[in-house]
Image: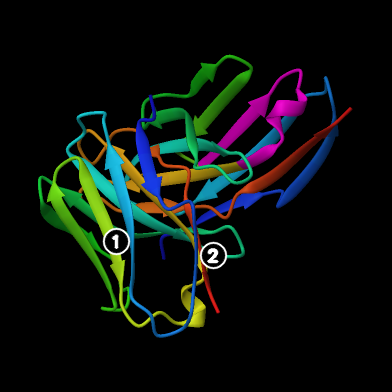
Amino acid sequence: KNQVEQSPQSLIILEGKNCTLQCNYTVSPFSNLRWYKQDTGRGPVSLTIMTFSENTKSNGRYTATLDADTKQSSLHITASQLSDSASYICVVRQTGANNLFFGTGTRLTVIP
Amino acid sequence: DTAVSQTPKYLVTQMGNDKSIKCEQNLGHDTMYWYKQDSKKFLKIMFSYNNKELIINETVPNRFSPKSPDKAHLNLHINSLELGDSAVYFCASSQGGKNIQYFGAGTRLSVL
């Protein structure tokens, strides 16, 4: 069964600290993996998109990693800011079938 | 300029009514989508249109019907609204089915 699981479900960190969000998937065949940030009351915004051959991709303070062998991805946030408070959603695309599988997201709260 | 815009932002209506949500994108994308986000914040794809052709149609009730007058618009029409239809509905667009999707701000539908 094609699934995307994210952990932790929620996370609270102090401003300035680093954190890592996890995404494990069973989607096959794999096409690409995306991380989205969704602020409360807003639509998701793309952070990174990674294909099979990419291990790491950065977007400012956000760094995503992908291990296609173990079917795991992580999103590392460096020097967190209050504006990083949001839900982070992992999305995996299946090759050929044009299907997208969404994780349930990790709710990150950054406190001063 | 807003890339993907949805109207209305909020919609409150009674059971049994028929309502429409409009979506427009000015990105020149050829593919548009509708997603439903339930109270658990899980995003589920409902429909996508590519050049006016339905290419994904998840198992949603036939009370929901997408209507695309042109490739810049994909409206969602819902007949005989039910309590369980209450959710946030997101419109998105992309160039091709494999590229990053850009989301609208969402329409919060409340059925009373």
Q: Residues within 10 Å of mark 2 (few under 14, many from 20)?
A: some
Q: Does residue A29 appear in the picture of this structure?
A: no
Residue B38's tag is: 2
- Quick check: is B108 in the magenta stretch? no
Q: How is the image coloured?
A: rainbow
Q: Residue at x 82, y 23 (%)?
A: A17
Chain to which mark 1 belongs? B
The 10 Å Cα crowd at callout 1, few under 14, some 14 to 19, many 20 or more, is many
Classify B41 as above or below A95: below
The image shows residue B3, relative to residue B8, as above or below, that is: above
Report whether residue A108 is seen.
Answer: yes
User: Residue A91 at what x, y percent from top left?
Assistant: 45, 45
Query: Are the residues flagged by discs 2 and 1 in contact, CB closer than 8 Å?
Result: no
According to the picture, the residue beneath numbered tag 1 turns out to be B76
Which quarter of the figure is the C terminus of chain B placed in?
bottom right
Task: Say which element carries label 2.
Answer: loop
Say if the magenta span includes residue A81.
Answer: yes
Identify which residue is drawn at 45% across, 54% down: A26
Amino acid type indicated by mark 2 = Asp
Left or right of A19? Residue A98 is left
**Badge 2 sits on which subunit?**
B
Is residue B31 left or right of B100 when viewed as pictured? left
> What stretch of residues is rendered in magenta?
A72-87
Residue A50 appears left or right of B64: right
In terms of image quadrants, where is residue A13?
top right
Quadrant where the image shows the N terminus of chain B: top left
